[in-house]
Amino acid sequence: MAKVKAEASGSSGVPSGDSARGGRRLHPDSDTCGHCEARSFNMCSALDTEELARLAALMSDQRVEAGTTFIEEGRPATELFNLRSGMVKVFKLLADGRCQITGFMGAGDFIGLSRGGTYAYSATAITPVTFCRFQRSQLRCLSDDLPKIERQMLGLTMNELMAAQDQMVLLGRKTARERIASFLLSLSDRAVRRGAAASPIDLPMTRGDIADYLGLTTETVSRTFTQLKGEGVITLKGNHGVEVADMEALVEVAGIEERDQDRAPYDLIA
């Protein structure tokens, strides 16, 4: 596993699994939470100043470089991660060595939740990522004192269930064109919910990553992007961006009869 580089707020540390081999953990300074761009839409959004201070006292503020795997499937699930910036791919390795990406997580997402004592998936940074890291046991104790955190954790569990249901529909009932159009729309809608523009859509992941997520081949993904471009639905901005030229056409390709952009399936309970 690649070593974590912790830079924010002058802290230093190592990822879960490397903790026993050295490294220091320092709590962030008092301004860290106040300057967090993801605070308004992450698990901290419902906390008041005093509650936020208690939560901040338990965390370490860290940064990892692109390519760093900071959660490994099967290892003890001792830590939780609240993403502040960047993008992460969450995946499982199949018995034959193939990779199934189950999601792309970004600012505002909380990862590391586990039904048992070990992580059920791995997580690798696609871009440089910053996150707040918590010891699972400490956060659980705090949630006993602060019901708001417990409600947020319940919301996170519900989000994971809804995301799994969406993925089942995507892989089981949609064609390649529908899957890619739905994927682009999901990223667009997510950006809107985070206060950004619906287009252009940032695609920091590789075509291979998209293929693994959608259950397609890399060639099919590339060919479908080219087809949508030729039809005037999208404009490609290099390998890592898409401008939506015709949003209605993209919705039609996705096979979505009624689209509710205000639907926020991944927002937490207030």
Image (cartoon, grey):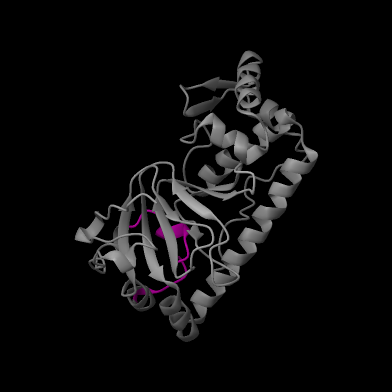
Q: Residue at x 69, y 47 (%)?
A: 167
Q: Is residue 128 left or right of residue 107?
A: left
Viewer-side residue, 261 vs 33: 33
Image height of 140 relative to 81, above or below: below
Q: Is residue 194 left or right of residue 169?
A: left
Residue 40 belongs to magenta span: yes
Magenta segment boundaries in residue numbering: 36-49
Viewer-side residue, 215 vs 262: 215
The answer to whether one can see residue 94 in this image is yes
Q: Residue at x 56, y 49 (%)?
A: 91
Q: Is residue 108 left or right of residue 31?
A: right
Residue 233 belongs to magenta span: no
Q: Is residue 117 left or right of residue 164?
A: left
Q: Position of residue 93 (x, y in %)?
A: 59, 48
Image height of 110 relative to 177, above or below: below
Q: Main secondary structure of the magenta part?
A: loop
Q: Position of residue 123 (x, y in %)?
A: 48, 52
Q: Residue furthest front?
A: 96
Q: Quadrant of the C terminus?
A: bottom right
Q: Quadrant of residue 116?
A: bottom right
Q: Quadrant of residue 44?
A: bottom left
Q: Position of residue 269 (x, y in %)?
A: 57, 67
Q: Residue at x 35, y 44 (%)?
A: 128
The answer to whether one can see residue 44 in this image is no
Image height of 107 relative to 241, above or below: below
Q: Residue furthest left?
A: 10
Q: Position of residue 147 (x, y in %)?
A: 51, 81
